[in-house]
Image: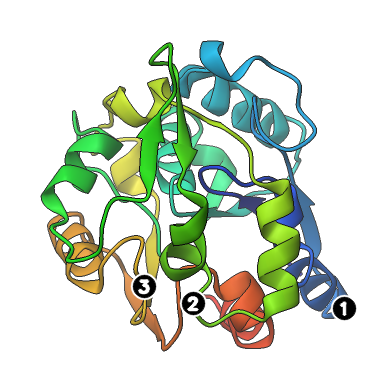
């Protein structure tokens, strides 16, 4: 059986995996989740959180595992797992990008976002001291949860946090010897209004993946299609 380490995206926490975890565990797998620094129950000041803080947390979890893990990153979590794979390639069996940012070397998340020209209005505003990003409440459902139940949307919106800005503007530094040697799988989401399907396909075309899995859903398949998502994760090779 496999060990999965599930990494949430921006504004979220480990709570977003609550429907997926029992489905993977029920199939006999070990599942690890975490709140990245400044997210969920982690009380690190959001204004001080860096990409290095994210990768330090992930590396410490990987270092505690005796076997390789399947490292899954959702959305912004793709930046974190990419940089972590550069530091700990020997600890990772597979990198899985779940409608996630897949940066090239020296690229930032913000650069990818700026190239993703969407018709919808921007959902993000920067806070007063230019350290964190906030979401416009009336646009959250359309951006993240278009196919989700009203109860899931309500509960998620109650838990969303400020997003540290620094991880968005810090370039990743990866090499072919380390990051490039870890197999990659991309799970694309056709009805995604946070990262357009065009942008997703541009990323995994530029940084080639071993397999592409398509889901006909929104940016949050862990809520909208948890059974289908879990089946895809269980069937990874």
Spatial CA distance of label 2 from label 3 is 8 Å
Seen at 20% across and 62% down, the residue is 199
Q: CA distance from mark 2 to mark 1?
A: 28 Å
The color scheme shown is: rainbow
- Looking at the picture, how far across and down is residue 82, in whole percent? 39, 41
**What residue would you read off at disc 3?**
192
Give the number of the mark in front: 2 or 3. Answer: 2
Q: Nearer the viewer's eye, disc 1 or disc 3?
A: 3
**What kind of element bears circle 2?**
loop
The residue that label 2 is drawn on is: 146
- Spatial CA distance of label 1 from label 3 is 28 Å
* Residue 205 % position (x, y): 15, 64
For the residues bearing labels 2 and 3, Cβ distance under 8 angstroms? no
Residue 4, can we see it? Answer: no
- Residue 66 x/y as whole percent: 76, 41
Choose the circle earlier in sequence order: 2 or 3: 2
Of circles 2 and 1, the one toward us is: 2
Mark closest to the chain's N terminus, 1 or 3: 1
152 over 13 or under it: above or below: below
Query: On screen, 8 above or below 188?
Result: above
Any part of residue 182 in sight: yes
**91 sits to left or right of 84:** right
How far from the left and from the top, in percent, is residue 133? Answer: 44, 31
Instruction: Determine which quarter of the picture holds residue 202.
Output: bottom left
Which residue position holds label 1? Answer: 26
């Amino acid at each position: 059986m496999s060990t999965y380490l599930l990494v949430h995206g921006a504004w979220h926490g480990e709570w977003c995996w609550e429907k997926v975890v029992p489905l993977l565990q029920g199939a006999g797998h070990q599942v690890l989740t975490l709140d990245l620094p400044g997210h969920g129950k982690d009380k690190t000041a959001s204004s001080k959180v860096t990409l290095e803080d994210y990768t330090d947390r992930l590396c410490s979890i990987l270092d505690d595992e005796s076997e390789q893990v399947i490292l899954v990153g959702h959305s912004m979590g793709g930046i974190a797992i990419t940089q972590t794979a550069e530091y700990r390639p020997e600890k990772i069996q597979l990198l899985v990008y779940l409608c996630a940012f897949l940066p090239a070397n020296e690229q930032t998340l913000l650069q990818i976002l700026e190239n993703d020209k969407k018709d919808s209005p921007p959902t993000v505003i920067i806070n007063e001291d230019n350290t964190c990003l906030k979401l416009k409440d009336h646009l959250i459902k359309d951006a993240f949860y278009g196919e989700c139940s009203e109860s899931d949307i309500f509960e998620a919106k109650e838990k969303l946090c400020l997003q540290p800005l620094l991880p968005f503007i810090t370039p990743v530094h990866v090499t072919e010897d380390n990051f490039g040697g870890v197999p990659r799988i991309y799970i694309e989401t056709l009805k995604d209004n946070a990262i357009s399907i065009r942008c997703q396909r541009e990323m995994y075309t530029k940084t080639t993946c071993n397999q592409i899995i398509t889901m006909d859903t929104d940016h949050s398949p862990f809520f909208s299609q948890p059974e289908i998502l879990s089946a895809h994760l269980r069937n990874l090779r």
